[in-house]
Amino acid sequence: MTPSPSIWHFIENHHRDGNACVLLYVLNSVGSSPGRQGFCMAVTRDSQMFGSIGGGIMEHKWVEFAKKMLDENQRFSLVRDQIHQDGIGDNRSGMICSGEQKIFIHLIQEADIPAVKAIAKSLDDKSTICLKLDPKGLHIVPDYSGDIQYLDFFR
């Protein structure tokens, strides 16, 4: 039985084919939020998408941002809070479910590909692997046995 493709296989395949890709990853969520920790999606230069960070207008906004950044051919890695309620300034998501989520948005670089391949392989093998996301990119944490607190990587 062939394993179903994952976002990591998607990223690996598109990178191999020369199609630049942005990773959007929900680092954490609080309260009523459509995207939960670990939700992720990829957007390619030619507008293909895989996965979800929660849907709705908030997801649409970040997909459009990813496409714009791909068009500008800029290297970037950033974290953005999204607050799902009216009356919030710059971090307002456009949704009204009253929760919050923190999103990591990263243009996949050549240096990220070993981590992407390791995750894809671990999924194929049904083994466990630990991914660290930080402003420098994607990294595998060898022999990690504790809980990762994603926010700690961004302080």
Image: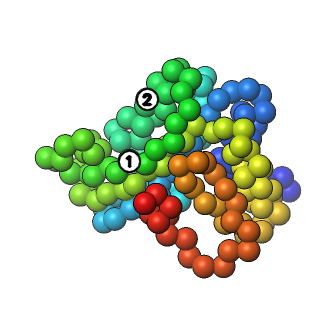
Taking the spot 50% from the left edge, 61% from the top edge, the residue there is 153
Toward the right, the furthest residue is: 1
Q: In the rendered image, which quarter is residue 55 located in?
A: top left
Give 22 or 49, whichever is nearer the viewer: 22
Taking the spot 61% from the left edge, 23% from the top edge, the residue there is 46
Residue 120 in sight from this viewpoint: no
Q: Is residue 6 above or below residue 124?
A: above
Toward the top, the furthest residue is: 71
In the rendering, at what x and y percent does residue 138 appear?
64, 51
Could you tell which of marks 1 and 2 lies nearer the N-terminus?
2
Q: In the rendered image, which quarter is residue 107 located in?
A: top right
Q: Which residue is mark 1?
A: 80
In the rendering, at what x and y percent does residue 118 appear?
77, 55
Residue 18 in sight from this viewpoint: yes
Q: Which mark is residue 113?
A: none
In the rendering, at what x and y percent does residue 22 appear?
57, 37
Q: Classify 10 Å Cα crowding around label 1: few (below 14), some (14-19), many (20 and above).
A: some
Q: Is residue 152 above or below residue 145?
A: above
Give the CA distance from mark 1 to mark 2.
Answer: 15 Å
Q: Amino acid at mark 2?
A: Glu
Q: Which residue is mark 2?
A: 64
Q: Amino acid at mark 1?
A: Arg
Classify residue 106 as left or right of residue 33. right
- Quadrant for the C terminus, please: bottom left
Q: Is residue 10 above or below residue 125?
A: above
Q: Secondary structure at mark 1?
A: strand
Classify residue 35 as left or right of residue 74. left
In the rendering, at what x and y percent does residue 147 appear?
56, 76
Give 11 or 79, whichever is nearer the viewer: 79
Instruction: Name the colour scheme.
Output: rainbow
Does the CB distance between marks 1 and 2 fall below 8 Å? no
